[in-house]
């Protein structure tokens, strides 16, 4: 007699230890007709992230909207047993299926970089070329790596492979939400400390400025909404070539208040 197949249950994540202050903002930029970025900034769920509808495909805004709306619903349903990889793969299937209805010939797609704060850590999932950064004690660290032609070619070259790409394709993404097969999801568990700042942003922010600019603005010591204004204003001052979206989360000392 064949034993029944049982599905492993995701680990239960403990409530986050410290308080969080968060704010989000988005701007269409100076050259795009529509804003195809979306964000999630939910202090109750302690869920944060950004999605950037893929340009060059129809319905990028629809893909990003579906991704963040379904993400919030799935995290709510998961309770404390959150499987970030499984949720992200399910979102991919949902967006891909919707793409067959909305754009049967080309489909639709979005990036997605999102995380939840639980226990003493940020649990992060990432697909595409949106980003997550941490500012700790004046040091800025990228917690995600772009899934782009240029970045993945660089990584392969570091392993000794010979890889070429054209300048036209350098920023094309190699993984996205909405692709026919489930994407490989980058996962990270980042231990958190009081005083940390975490920035989730689309490439309209991070491609418009160097890490030194991000570090300077995040370290201004102002209210979070003024910091986000600074990031978006700088992106627009440098041409505003893309939609600019950011979610900023600061970690406090005690889990007493949430915004």
Image: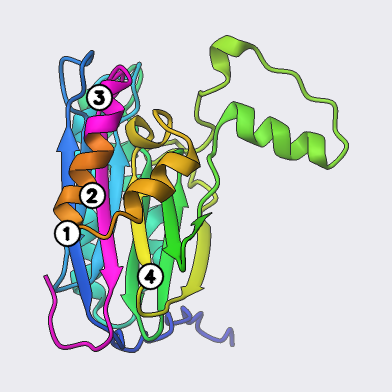
**Res 236 label:** 3
Q: Position of residue 198 (x, y in %)?
A: 36, 61
State the CA–CA distance, disc 2 to disc 4.
15 Å
The answer to whether residue 226 is visible is yes
**Res 33 label:** none
Q: Position of residue 21 (x, y in %)?
A: 19, 69
The residue labelled by disc 4 is: 196
Q: What's the residue at 25%, 24% (across, down)?
A: 236
* Disc nearer the start of the sequence (2/4): 4
Q: Nearer the viewer, mark 3 or mark 1?
A: 1
The residue labelled by disc 2 is: 227
> Tag 3's secondary structure?
helix
Work out which quarter of the rendered image holds the N terminus and state it. bottom right
State the CA–CA distance, disc 2 to disc 1.
7 Å
Q: Is residue 151 magenta?
A: no
State the CA–CA distance, disc 4 to disc 3.
26 Å
State the CA–CA distance, disc 3 to disc 1.
20 Å
| Quarter residue 160 falls in | top right
Q: Position of residue 168 (x, y in %)?
A: 55, 10
**Res 223 label:** 1
State the CA–CA distance, disc 4 to disc 1.
14 Å
The answer to whether residue 69 is visible is no
Specify the segment rendered in magenta. Answer: 233-259
> Tag 2's secondary structure?
helix
Question: Mark 2 touching mark 1, by CB under 8 A?
Answer: yes
* Disc nearer the start of the sequence (4/1): 4
Badge 3 crowding class, 10 Å Cα cut-off, few under 14, some 14 to 19, many 20 or more, is many
State the CA–CA distance, disc 2 to disc 3.
14 Å
């Amino acid at each position: 007699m064949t034993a029944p197949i049982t599905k492993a249950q995701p680990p239960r994540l403990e409530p986050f230890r410290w308080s969080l202050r968060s704010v989000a903002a988005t701007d269409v930029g100076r050259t795009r007709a529509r804003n195809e970025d979306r964000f999630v900034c939910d202090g109750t769920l302690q869920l944060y992230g950004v999605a950037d509808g893929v340009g060059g495909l129809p319905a990028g805004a629809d893909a990003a909207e579906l991704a963040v709306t379904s993400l919030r619903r799935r995290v709510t349903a998961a309770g404390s047993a959150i499987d970030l990889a499984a949720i992200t793969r399910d979102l991919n299937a949902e967006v891909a299926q919707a793409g067959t209805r909305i754009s049967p010939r080309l489909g639709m797609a979005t990036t997605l970089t999102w995380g939840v704060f639980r226990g003493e850590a940020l649990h992060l999932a990432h697909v595409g070329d949106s980003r997550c950064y941490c500012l700790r004690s004046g040091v800025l660290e990228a917690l995600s790596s772009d899934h782009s032609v240029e970045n993945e070619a660089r990584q392969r070259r570091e392993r000794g492979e010979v890889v070429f790409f054209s300048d036209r394709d350098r920023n094309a993404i190699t993984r996205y939400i909405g692709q026919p097969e489930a994407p490989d999801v980058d996962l990270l568990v980042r231990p958190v400390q009081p005083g940390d700042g975490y920035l989730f942003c689309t490439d309209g922010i991070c491609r418009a400025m160097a890490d030194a600019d991000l570090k300077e603005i995040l370290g201004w010591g102002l209210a979070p909404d003024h910091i986000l204004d600074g990031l978006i204003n700088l992106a627009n001052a440098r041409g505003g070539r893309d939609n600019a979206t950011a979610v900023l989360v600061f970690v406090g000392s005690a889990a007493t208040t949430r915004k």
